[in-house]
Each structure stands twice: as C-alpha cells, then as structure tokens.
Amino acid sequence: MPESVISANHTVSTGKDGRIIFVVGKDAFLLRQNSTLSMTGRNTLVHTLRLTTGALLMVFGKTEHRLEVPSGTIGIRGTGLYAEAQPEQSYVCTCYGITEISAAGTSQRETIESTHHDAPRYLLSDGKDRIRPAPVKDHTDEELMLIETLVGRVPPFALYDEAYGRALRY
C-alpha cells in the first residue's frame, strides 16, 4: 500500500504479479515479483538483508551492508547491486561500487570493484568453483536511476548508450 511504512526490521514479500519500490533511510530498493526480503537494522539504517527468493535491485548510501542469498553473502559499500536468489544458484551484479562476494560454507571470496556492470557473478550452492562469471541480465540503468532518485542521488554512469543514442538494457 502506498501509505505503508517500511523500516530496517521488516520482511517484505511480493506475489506473482507484485513489485514494490521503497526507501529505508539512504537506501532504496526495487523488489520484483515472487520475492521475499528480510531486513535487520536499527530505525532507518539497514545492516543485513536476506533475499530468500526472487530478485532485488538496490542502491546504498556510504554505510556498510550485508546481503545474504541462499548460496552466499555479499558485503556492500556505497553500491548499486542487483541480485536473484534461487536455492541452487544465485546471481549478483555489482552495478557500481565495491562488493565482497563469499560462497556459503567455503573460503571462496572475490572483491568486485565496478563502475558499470563490470563483473556479474553466479554463486553456486555446491561444486569446486562456486563463484563464476555471469552475463549482465534482468535489470536496467533506468531502474537504477529511478531508485537513486528516490534518495536524492544519481548513479555514476551515463544513462544512454552514446553509440546508439538509446537507453541501455541488459
């Protein structure tokens, strides 16, 4: 509902035709259909997010955050991030900023420093190499612009593809 207040300690779920865009403090989120997100924190400061199912686009202020998906954990610092959570494989795109991706139950980790969707990754639930390169998919620069606008910021990249004169889509 438009008048609902979402704070740092809420769980938000969407149905098959649902989608919700919301702000908590200096962070903004776009939760897609069939998704469940639990947040913990204090007042308007989210510290930990747990995406158990579905997809989430998020932008963060300068504070540190942590995102948990079924197959790993992502440490976040001043970042735009897109994630999809599935039991066997999760997807993470550091749209811009710095993240540290860790595969659950292993010592495998990777630090990503991205300026514009430079290093998307799959996180697998089992196997030897559980952090693997992935394509950019299922989120747009326009969506990032929208949710950054909600918290008074703009993303650090150009919205339009200069070569083709149109909006970028992945």
Image (tube, grey):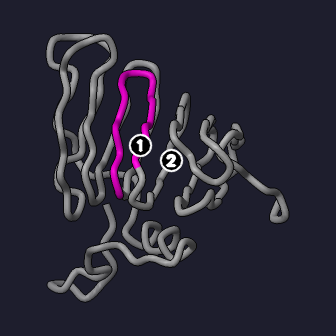
> Is residue 67 magenta-colored?
yes
Q: Can you give x and y, in whole percent of width and height, for residue 154 in the image?
A: 40, 77
Q: Residue at x 37, y 22 (%)?
A: 71
Q: Amino acid at mark 1?
A: Ala
Q: Residue at x 15, y 84 (%)?
A: 163
Kindly identify which numbered label has been placed on residue 56: 2
* Residue 13 seen anywhere in this rendered image of the structure: no
Q: Amino acid at mark 2?
A: Leu
Kindly identify which numbered label has been placed on residue 83: 1
Q: Residue 117 is drawn in which quadrant?
A: bottom left
The boundaries of the magenta stretch are 64-78
Image quadrant occupied by the C terminus: bottom left
Q: Is residue 77 above or below residue 28?
A: above
Mark 2 or 1, nearer chain start: 2
Magenta: main secondary structure? strand
* Residue 151 seen anywhere in this rendered image of the structure: yes
